[in-house]
Amino acid sequence: MIDYLMDDNDDLLIVNGDFVRGESNQQQQRKLLLAEKGEYRQAPLATVGTFQFLNDEGSIAGEDLLREIRLRFSQDGVAIQGMGFENGFLNIRGDYVK
């Protein structure tokens, strides 16, 4: 998907005074992960709300997070080939179905 790109601070990316457009699939997936439930008024349940899972303890919280990611990403059109925690980082392999 082509869209306006954001920088590392989630501000519009501007180069030479112009907005930058480019492939935004990873940017969209990042937004789905980090936005809290209800943050997008037009689609209040579309996001994962990852931070709500950080306060939960135990392996069940991790399993619930992965389940929520799979559900919300599939609703957004992402086909996930693989997902899990590797070296303490969340790794998601998937792309939008065309």
Image (cartoon, helix red, strand yellow):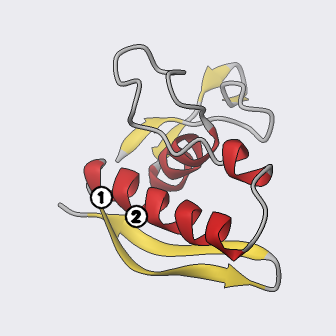
At which x and y percent is residue 71? 35, 57
Label 2 belongs to which residue?
Answer: 70
Amino acid at the residue labelled 1: Ser
Residue drawn where x is 38% and y is 43% of the image: 2
Q: How many marks?
A: 2
Amino acid at the residue labelled 2: Arg
Q: Quadrant of residue 39?
A: top right
At which x and y percent is residue 20? 58, 33
Label 1 belongs to which residue?
Answer: 74
Label 1 near label 2: C-beta < 8 Å?
Answer: yes
Residue drawn where x is 65% and y is 69% of the image: 62
Tag shown at residue 8: none
Position of 92 with respect to 89 (left or right) is left
Secondary structure of the residue carrying numbered label 2? helix
Q: Is residue 59 above or below residue 65?
A: below
Q: Crowdedness of circle 1 by 10 Å Cα count: few (<14), some, many (20+)?
A: some
Choose between 58 and 82: the one closer to the eye: 58
Choose between 80 and 68: the one closer to the eye: 68
Q: Residue furthest left?
A: 98
Q: Crowdedness of circle 2 by 10 Å Cα count: few (<14), some, many (20+)?
A: some
Q: CA distance from mark 2 to mark 1?
A: 6 Å
Residue drawn where x is 72% and y is 25% of the image: 11
At which x and y percent is residue 54? 77, 52
Q: Is residue 80 above or below residue 98?
A: below
Which quarter shows the C terminus? bottom left
Secondary structure of the residue carrying numbered label 1? helix
Position of 19 with respect to 96 (left or right) is right
